[in-house]
Image (cartoon, rainbow, N blue to C red):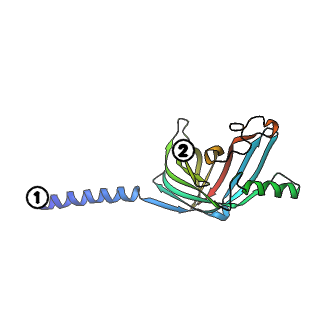
């Protein structure tokens, strides 16, 4: 009788452990690059410019409803501009953005964001923690996201605000150069993203 009780107890414990393992199993979700987009905005004293950059790859690792890891790679050679209508001026801006003054794309063709975890912010928004690497320089970054399901797919959207000077992009920065006047460019630029998994 005692052996039977011990076996039943063991079976119960194993069942609970298996249920917990299933409930909190990690899930790796691959980014649908053809359905995802990243748009950038850079501001200056006289206005702003906008454009896009393509994602080469991405994966998000979930555990229950928590984001616990992931990695996203951007193709910096794919930088485009959307607001300038003059083809020559638009081309000049894109060429400048790819130059050593900004992202030095020939030397650093990729930028990468690695997710290290997530947490709930004071306002109830999900905050993603990670490290961003641009031009071979890595810094921590935290930002809020909205994430929900579309059938069997997941949609994640949000915006990163990045201080470019932390990545040795100092061109036109009032923090490093004096008397720039209306040629001053904001240290911060934005990456707005809509991602599908």
Residue at coordinates 86% horizontally, 54% vertically from top-left? 89
What residue occupies the far left of the structure in this picture? 1
Corner quadrant of residue 6? bottom left
Residue 162 position, x and y percent, is: 64, 45
Q: In front here: 40 or 167?
A: 167
Residue 176: percent from left, percent from top = 69, 38
Q: Quadrant of the C terminus?
A: bottom right
Q: Is 126 positioned to the left or the right of 168 in the image? A: left
Q: Which mark is residue 20?
A: none
Do residues under tags 2 and 1 come within 8 Å of each other at their CB atoms? no
Which type of secondary structure does the marked residue at label 2 adopt?
A: strand
| Mark toward the start of the polypeptide (2 vs 1) | 1
Identify the image quadrant of residue 22: bottom left
Q: Quadrant of residue 8?
A: bottom left
Q: Which residue is mark 1?
A: 2
Residue under pointer 2: 126
Q: Which residue is depicted at the point 78% across and 34% down? A: 179
Up/down of 164 relative to 100, above or below: above
Name the outermost residue toward the front. Answer: 178
Q: What's the distance in space between the residues labelled 2 and 1, CA to CA?
A: 50 Å
From the viewer's side, name the closer residue of 77 and 114: 77
Give coordinates of residue 97: x percent, y percent.
74, 54
Q: Nearer the viewer, residue 185 or 178?
A: 178
* Residue 140 visible somewhere in the drawing: yes
Along the horizontal axis of the image, is 165 left or right of 69?
A: right
Figure disc tally: 2
């Amino acid at each position: 009788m005692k052996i039977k009780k011990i076996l039943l107890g063991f079976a119960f414990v194993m069942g609970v452990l298996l249920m917990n393992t299933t409930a909190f199993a990690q899930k790796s979700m691959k980014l649908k690059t053809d359905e995802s987009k990243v748009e950038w905005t850079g501001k200056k004293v006289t206005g702003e410019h906008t454009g896009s950059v393509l994602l080469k790859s991405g994966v998000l690792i979930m555990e229950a409803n928590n984001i616990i890891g992931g990695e996203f790679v951007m193709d910096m050679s794919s930088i485009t501009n959307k607001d300038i209508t003059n083809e020559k001026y638009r081309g000049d801006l894109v060429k400048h953005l790819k130059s050593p003054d900004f992202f030095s794309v020939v030397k650093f063709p990729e930028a990468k964001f690695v997710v290290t975890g997530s947490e709930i912010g004071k306002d109830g928004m999900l905050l993603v923690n990670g490290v961003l690497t641009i031009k071979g320089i890595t810094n921590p970054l935290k930002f809020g996201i909205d994430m929900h399901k579309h059938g069997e797919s997941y949609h994640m959207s949000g915006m990163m605000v990045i201080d470019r000077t932390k990545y040795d992009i100092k061109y036109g920065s009032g923090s490093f150069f004096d008397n720039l006047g209306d040629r001053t460019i904001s240290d911060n630029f934005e990456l707005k993203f809509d991602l599908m998994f």
